[in-house]
Image (cartoon, helix red, strand yellow):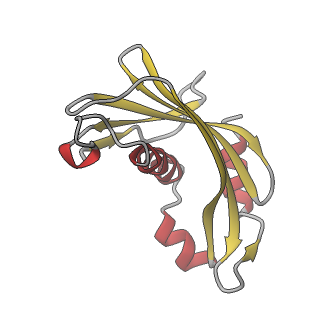
């Protein structure tokens, strides 16, 4: 799946991150429609690139701090189907922020059409113990700027 991301500091008035995604054959079912579970992959990639945009790659975060993020809950509303070769935009914004969790609002769009809307709650946890842990203060401050 080809994807591109917006990087750099948040432009004034910009409160969300966007990731471009093209739908490939492997993303679709026999009818040429994106298989419902593959939207979760698109959402995950947008969140991962959002963190990377802030200077926090998942592998580096795990190696340097012993911390990682995991999805705690998700709700998704599938509104319109995406199809083979569609160019999509997956957005990611912060809806809530705690010391050990982040609530994301995410959308999948095709042109002006809203295809999917989701709410994803992600928890920060300590890899060694498998228990919730506060995220690094610097990351928390960077995320706060997007609320």
Residue at 75% of width from left, 76% of height from top?
131
- Image position, residue 142 (x, y; %): 66, 47
Q: Is residue 96 left or right of residue 33?
A: right
**What is the residue that sits farthest to the top in this orientation?**
112
Where on the picture, by quarter, is residue 20? top left
Residue at 31% of width from left, 41% of height from top?
4
**What is the residue that sits farthest to the bottom in this orientation?**
128
- Image position, residue 93 (x, y; %): 60, 35
Residue at 53% of width from left, 59% of height from top?
56
In this picture, is 127 found above or below 19?
A: below
Looking at the picture, tell me which residue is in the foreground, 20 or 74: 74
- Image position, residue 51 (x, y; %): 53, 52
Where on the picture, by quarter, is residue 106? top right
Q: Is residue 90 left or right of residue 26?
A: right
**What is the residue that sits farthest to the right in this orientation?**
98
Looking at the picture, tell me which residue is in the foreground, 122 or 61: 122
State which quarter of the image contains the C terminus: top right
Where on the picture, by quarter, is residue 21? top left
In this picture, is 35 found above or below 124?
A: above
- Image position, residue 109 (x, y; %): 42, 25
In this picture, is 38 found above or below 78?
A: below
- Report the number of discs: 0
Residue at 80% of width from left, 51% of height from top?
98
């Amino acid at each position: 799946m080809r994807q591109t991301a917006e990087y750099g500091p948040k432009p004034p008035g910009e409160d969300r991150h966007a990731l471009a995604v093209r739908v490939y054959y492997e993303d679709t079912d026999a009818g040429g429609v994106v298989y419902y579970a593959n939207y979760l992959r698109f959402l995950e990639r947008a969140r991962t690139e959002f963190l990377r945009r802030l200077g926090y790659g998942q592998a580096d975060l795990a190696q340097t701090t012993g911390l990682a993020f995991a999805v705690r809950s998700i709700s998704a509303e599938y509104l319109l189907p995406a199809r083979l070769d569609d160019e999509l935009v997956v957005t990611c914004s912060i809806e809530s922020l705690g010391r050990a969790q982040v609530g994301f609002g995410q959308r999948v769009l095709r042109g002006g059409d809203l295809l999917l809307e989701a709410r994803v709650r992600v928890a920060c946890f300590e890899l060694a113990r498998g228990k919730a842990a506060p995220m690094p203060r610097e990351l928390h401050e960077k995320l706060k700027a997007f609320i």
